[in-house]
């Protein structure tokens, strides 16, 4: 028997360290932007929202004398 003796505590702790490193890397990718980069993206988003709001079509009210339904087709 030349199997290596393994300390289970070391294996468990190594697994936890690897998981923590993976989570840290994921968080750096998700949240790792500088304040200047966040400000630029925020300004671009606000500008795009303003442009979209400015292009919104507001429906006009129909005159009371003009119906939008043809009275001959109403069941």
Image: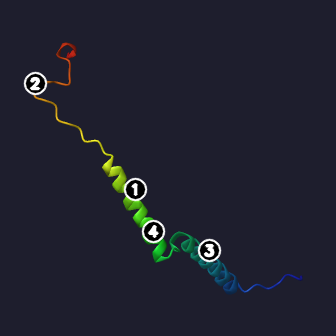
Left or right relative to 68: residue 28: right
Q: Which residue corresponds to mark 1? A: 48
Disc 3: CA contacts within 10 A as few (<14), some (14-19) or many (>=20): few
Q: Which residue corresponds to mark 3? A: 22
Vertical placement of 56 versus 28: above or below? above
Say what secondary structure mark 3 lies in: helix
Left or right relative to 70: residue 38: right
- Circle nearer the N terminus (3, 4): 3
Q: Which residue corresponds to mark 2? A: 65
In the rendered image, residue 8, in percent from the top left (x then y), is placed at: 69, 83
- Circle nearer the N terminus (4, 2): 4
Viewport quadrant of the N terminus: bottom right
Colour treatment of the image: rainbow
- Circle nearer the N terminus (1, 2): 1
Q: Quadrant of residue 45?
A: bottom left
Badge 3 vs badge 4, beta-carbon distance below 8 Å: no
* Label 1 – label 2 distance at C-alpha: 39 Å
- Circle nearer the N terminus (4, 1): 4
Disc 2: CA contacts within 10 A as few (<14), some (14-19) or many (>=20): few
Vertical placement of 48 versus 64: above or below? below
Left or right relative to 74: residue 9: right
* Label 3 – label 2 distance at C-alpha: 68 Å
Count the marks.
4
Q: For this rendering, which residue is in front, 43 or 68?
A: 43
Q: Which residue corresponds to mark 4? A: 40
In the rendered image, residue 11, in percent from the top left (x then y), is placed at: 69, 82
């Amino acid at each position: 028997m030349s199997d290596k003796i393994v300390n289970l505590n070391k294996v468990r702790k190594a697994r936890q360290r690897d998981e923590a490193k993976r989570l840290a890397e994921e968080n750096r990718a998700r949240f790792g932007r500088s304040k200047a980069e966040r400000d630029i993206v925020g300004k671009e988003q606000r500008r795009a929202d303003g442009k979209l709001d400015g292009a919104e079509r507001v429906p006009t009210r129909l005159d009371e004398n003009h119906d939008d339904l043809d009275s001959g087709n109403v069941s």
